[in-house]
Image (cartoon, rainbow, N blue to C red):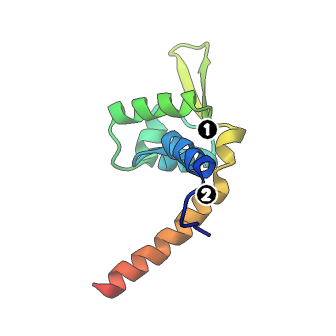
Amino acid sequence: MISKGGCPKTMLSIKDALEAVEGRWKLLILFSLAEHPKRFGELSKSVVGITDKTLSRELKLLEANKLITRQVYDSFPPKVEYSITEHGISLEKVLDELHFWGLLHRSKILKDS
């Protein structure tokens, strides 16, 4: 339930959470990685519409927030793989709720237009 006054601690925790997953792409990247670890090219294909430059930036931010890990394998050519962390997996309920809300929202918008 959303309170009307807004507790400062609650506001701060919501701000922190939003900063960790802000933007158009981070949750979609996490959703893609929840399936299985992926290389950069696989991620680029699975997150439709993202540019390589944006994907690279978002991956660095997700790694800084400990939501994903970047594993570099000692091989030729070098292989880099991205995986979701346990901390990232903890967003599963948020993603599920956002998915269900998105379905309701889309239905309402299409119905009312």
Q: Mark 2 points at which residue?
A: 94
Residue drawn at (57%, 44%) of the image? 12
The spot of residue 1 in percent (x, y) is 62, 70
The spot of residue 11 in percent (x, y) is 55, 50
Q: Seen from this angle, which residue lies furthest right?
A: 86
Q: In which quarter of the image is residue 100?
A: bottom right
Question: Disc count in the image?
Answer: 2
27 horizontally vs 107: left or right? right
- Amino acid type, label 2: Val
Q: How crowded is mark 1: few (under 14 residues within 10 Å), some or many (20 or more)?
A: some
The spot of residue 50 in percent (x, y) is 35, 43
77 horizontally vs 73: left or right? left
89 horizontally vs 47: left or right? right
Q: Mark 1 points at which residue?
A: 37
Disc 2 is placed on an element classified as helix
Q: Nearer the viewer, residue 71 or 88?
A: 88
Q: Residues within 10 Å of mark 2 (few under 14, many from 20)?
A: few
The spot of residue 27 in percent (x, y) is 51, 49
